[in-house]
Image (cartoon, rainbow, N blue to C red):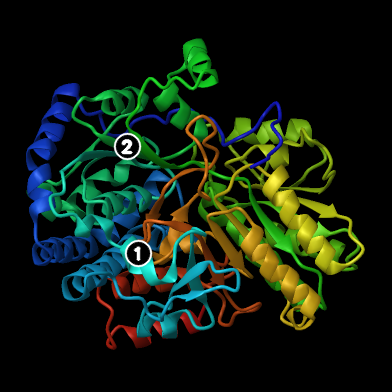
Amino acid sequence: MTQVAAEVHGSAALPEAEHRIAPTSKTRIDDAIAVLDDHKQDWVALDLDERIDLLEKARASTADVAEAWVAASVQGKRMTAGTGEEAEEWMGGPGAVLRNMTLLITSLRDIRDYGVPQLPKPAYERPDGQVVAPVLPANGWDGILFQGFTAEIWMEPDVKLAELEDHQASFYKQKSPKGRVALVLGAGNHSSIGPMDALYKLFVEGQVVVMKMNPVNEIVGPFIEEAFAPLSEAGFFKVVYGGAAEGDYLCKHLRVEEIHITGSDKTHDAIVYGVGEDGARRKAANDPVNGKRLTCELGNVSPVIVVPGPWSQKDLEFHGVNVASSVCNNSGYNCSATRVVVQHEQWDRREGFVAALQKAFRDAGDRDPYYPGSEARHETFLEHHPDADQFGTKGRGNVPWTLIHHLDPNDPDEICFNMESWCGQTSEVALPATAVAEYVDEAVKFCNERVWGTLNASIIVHPKSMKDPAIAEAVERAIANLRYGTVAVNHWAGLNFALGTTTWGAFPGHTVDDIRSGQGVVHNTYMFDRPQKTVLRGPFRVFPTPAWFITNKNSVEIGRKMTYFNADPSLMRLPGLIWASVRG
């Protein structure tokens, strides 16, 4: 896999946040791991009904603390309650965790009754033989709430259709599984990441879990402890606190057997090879200091390919908000945030789309840059591009929304292609081509070879463009050829993170000495062990306004109602959720 290395490349190295909860002592860490080690064999010996019962109890306790969980998250991130910022904490916090739990309960029941989780539609083979499993809509509720959206998991090319079930729920097919203690190093940006990573380790891979909260969002930790109390009280899950020192102690702990992190490639390399000159030497020699199995999701410079077409002014404005929303969500602290918008140089609406982006950022309100180091990272990009567009309040303590456009696609050292900014910044570049289909092929090549990372990418294409056979073939070819763990059509690829049935992780193939966006996947409630990518498709335009758009005026109510619906899907809860969505 060829990607140009620059002086600066990869995901951002982030300074440690100040602690609001005292780090857990080594003695108490040892005690927590000892409990897990003592119960790891009990965990793998549990029958499915016992697992379902524990997960149902955890789902109920998660719903009980959801309100307090969100309030703590809003406070910790210095966000404004009652705005879209709070809505994001509902949807990206307990709402996502509860959906994940409900889907896992369904899968566990299927394993009990049928041997493997049951797909909503039969899997099939693409013309080239690659196996595709439909995973959204997962049920009738999804069909109502996600009208027009579909998602599929594409398997690695050597998986055969007749053998697909052999690649589901592998842990549950083991005759005498060995219990293992897994460490989950939680991410600081979304409070659902750590718990959902833990759910994957527990219920898909069959491991007991010690989860260390990230100092950035550790204030939410007590509510996660309460939510997961049924699992913790049984000796299968523990939460600890601390920063790099505690993380290092946990990673090297003799009774920790596996590690999962969501963070940066710098953190991965520090765990595997060590730090400083010795770490650099070890990485160069591929001589790990820590040889434990490590799965990880490590960031991305996420591209969006805009396909030229007969776009109206309303189309431009809709997708200006669409892309801007992916940047503004969570104040820009998402590995799935759009960082590079790729356009066709000859498209007569290129400047119109740049203007639509500028308007969307101009209309977006200021947000507090709560993540440590934001101002310094923002300044680094401004040093490279002092003429960047900035929208919102400037000066100390602020990070304005920043758009850097009309970049040179041939510049091998372009920071916007090589480094994940981890703040409210994005960029735009155009590629020359004599025809649209040729442009799409060139855009795929550009993303695969010039843009750092393999986590997620999106394509936006007008439905009338898809009526042209050459363009339609080019778009389908792009979906197949993009080397990303998630490819989304017409919408933000970050949606896949919260859907649960979809996979979340890098495109397979990275090695430990060249880890890029990581290894392995999470979520994946159908429990596939050989996924290559997830493909999400949605309508070109959506009504009512999507809940994740920064222009949605009722997103808090939608987020709250969606959270409780995820905890208990029912006809009683559905009308209120639909009504809230319509009023957005």
The residue sitting at 58% across, 75% down in the picture is: 538
**Numbered circle sitting on residue 95:** 1
Q: Secondary structure at mark 1?
A: helix
Up/down of 267 relative to 456, above or below: above
Three-letter amino acid code at the position of disc 2: Ile
Up/down of 226 relative to 217, above or below: below
Up/down of 29 relative to 86, above or below: above
Q: Residue 135, can we see it?
A: yes
The location of residue 421, given as percent across then percent down, is 62, 40
Quarter of the image where the N terminus is located: top right
The location of residue 97, given as percent across then percent down, is 32, 60
Observer-nearest of 471 and 192? 471
Question: Label 2 belongs to which residue?
Answer: 259
The residue sitting at 52% across, 18% down in the picture is: 285
**Numbered circle sitting on residue 550:** none
The quarter of the picture where residue 531 lies is bottom left
- Say how many tags the image has: 2
Q: Is residue 126 left or right of residue 25?
A: right
Q: Is residue 465 left or right of residue 109?
A: right
Measured Cα–Cα span from mark 2 to mark 1: 25 Å
How crowded pointer 1 is (Cα within 10 Å; few <14, some 14-19, many 20+) is rated as many
The location of residue 505, given as percent across then percent down, is 47, 51
Three-letter amino acid code at the position of disc 1: Gly
Q: Are marks 2 and 1 in contact (CB under 8 Å)?
A: no
Q: Residue 14, can we see it?
A: no
How crowded pointer 2 is (Cα within 10 Å; few <14, some 14-19, many 20+) is rated as many
The residue sitting at 26% across, 51% down in the picture is: 205
Observer-nearest of 582 and 341? 341
